[in-house]
Amino acid sequence: MARDYRNNTVEEIKSRCNIVDVIGRVVPLKKAGRNYKGLCPFHKEKTPSFIVSEDKQIFTCFGCGETGDVIGFVEKYYNLDFRGAVEMLAREYGIEITGNFGGSKEKEELYEINRLAARFFYKALREKANPGYDYMKRRGISEEIMNKFGIGYADGGWQSLLDHMRSLKVDLNRLMELGLISKTNDRYYDKFRDRVIFPILNTSGKVIGFGGRIIANGEPKYLNSPESPVFQKKNNLYGLNICKSDVTAEDRIILVEGYMDVVSLYQAGVRNVAASLGTALTPQQAALIKRYTKNVVLSYDADEAGQNAAMRGVDILYDADCRARVLKVTDGKDPDEFIKSKGRRAFLDLADNAQPYGDFKMNRIKEKYDLEDEQQRIDFLREMILVLKAMKPVDADLYMQKISDISGISRRAIQAEFMAAGDRSPQISPGTMDEITGELSHEEMTAARLMMLDPKYSRLPDDVRKLLFQSERGEQIYDLLKNEEDRPYPLRANSFRDAADPEIYDLMCQIEEVIIPEDKEEIAYRDCVAFVRKKELERRNQEITWQLSLADDDIDDEDLAALMKEQLEIQKKLKGQV
């Protein structure tokens, strides 16, 4: 039934959204026979090769090869996933999204309540004189920028928002769930009081939560919405809804820690900026960033806490195959203070000269040791070995030489220490984050969703199962789903509420949200299997590369020949030759 609902929604969008109208808003089109022609928005060209067919409702670029329907164009142009593109078009054309595709009615209700709250706070900042407006003006923020980010104000009253929501007959339990009100004994009261309010929107433009900065003295300085069915910090970035097109245009994102950092940098003209919602950067946020760019500059506070957060963040970004660099703001200032005192150009100079991932890690570790002391040089080397173990072979080879230059320890000794460390050093990869975060890889999520849609995907060959479900949580979910053929399909997460522990149940709910277009299940399965098999080949290829590059001169000729033959076969498979 869920698939029928989803299909109906997509078909209605395609029938009601004229592709010429949708594309014509952002690409100047001229009539050319039965079609329309314009300059392709996906690559630079001087002669138009971008064709839009009104009859067929498709677009094609004969320059770069991009092609698709109206949903595909919105996905590509606005950097949205399939679901986000459907939601955007449905919202603009007044199409109701029903069934499993559109998410639950409960979530839509929560989004609407957040929207009402954001509107209430927005009006409160502007209707009459108030401390919130004065505070933002003292911080140098213009009305235009306050409006751009929808910044609002929660007064010092205990029931201002509550009374407003009661007048709209909003369910108090929903307000509690969203963290907009609290309850002590039988008394309800506003959670956000005497604070400037920063609405947090997802990339589809829905209000998912709030951050409140206290105006007077008090704690906490910042109060954020709690986790809810519509708000998970790990999955979102503040400001990305506004800045995503600038991130794409610049092919770089600058990540900061706070709401005010984003707002101040944006006002100063640095518009490819977002914030990580006050938490350590997560693999989910790294995956979100990669939809727009692979180039990331971390601009966290210069204090110890900020630099430690940067140390963790660059690891997450490196593992996600992003090109991570770290900007250290001088004079102990945060980005907000720096750009106000030094200006946009000075800040961009810092960004352009930010330290690459490996240099930042090495220099931070170096600060802990006196390299004039023999024992501390050894301790420095051993800590750096942990960093080398997590690097790709080419990067690690480069940094072995840099470590040698800094420490005075010979490169050969560093290589020997590296080999002696064996597998003792932890190496984090995107597919094995479960031990650290409790999360599943993209492939595990997709494979589990397929198992919920059709029982045939529960009957996996052992080698495929082991590659698809590598994490502890993934194995637990596989075990939970594999023997459910007697239940009606598609399986629902609620069916496992009592059979699974809360963390597993939460993951099951997330898996149920994974969208696999109708009739694309087999393609999704093959793509997953191909991806994990390729990753396994790449892992073994990397392992052999290390064995060959760091091997002694005394290695047995037969062993050497066997390694080289195995690597040749692997490389042929990776190139599709066998």
Image (tube, rainbow, N blue to C red):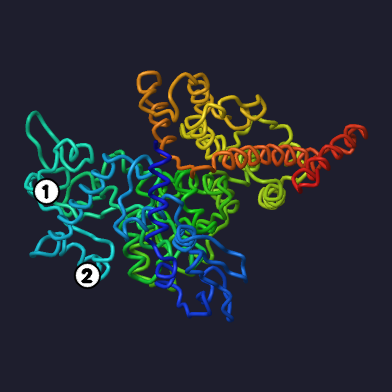
Q: Element at badge 1?
A: helix
In the displayed structure, would residue 75 be above or below residue 417?
A: below
**How many labels were placed on the picture?**
2
Is 409 on the left or on the right of 308, as rendered? Answer: right
Q: Quadrant of the N terminus?
A: top left
Q: Position of residue 108 (x, y in %)?
A: 27, 45
Q: Element at badge 2?
A: helix
Q: Position of residue 514 (x, y in %)?
A: 45, 40
Q: Which residue is mark 1?
A: 161
Residue 458 seen: yes
Q: Judge by depth and name the residue closer to the eye, 162 or 40.
A: 40
Q: Do the numbered discs 1 and 2 sit on residues whose CB atoms are within 8 Å?
A: no
Mark 1 neighbour class, 10 Å CA radius: few under 14, some 14 to 19, many 20 or more: many
Q: Position of residue 230 (x, y in %)?
A: 31, 43
Q: Judge by depth and name the residue closer to the eye, 295 or 459.
A: 459
How many angstroms separate mark 1 from mark 2 (CA)?
A: 23 Å
Q: Position of residue 6 (x, y in %)?
A: 40, 44
Task: Point out which mark residue 357 bears.
Answer: none
Residue at coordinates 47% horizontally, 18% vertically from top-left?
A: 486
Residue 435 seen: no
Residue at coordinates 39% horizontally, 23% vertically from top-left?
A: 496
Q: Amino acid at mark 1?
A: Leu
Is 21 on the left or on the right of 563, as rendered? Answer: left
Residue at coordinates 50% horizontally, 46% vertically from top-left?
A: 311
Q: Quadrant of the C terminus?
A: top right
Q: Judge by depth and name the residue closer to the eye, 490 or 471.
A: 490
In the displayed structure, would residue 464 be above or below residue 143?
A: above
Front tag of 1 and 2: 1
Q: Which residue is mark 2?
A: 143
Residue at coordinates 55% horizontally, 47% vertically from top-left?
A: 320
Nearer the N terminus, badge 1 or badge 2? Answer: 2
Q: Amino acid at mark 2?
A: Glu
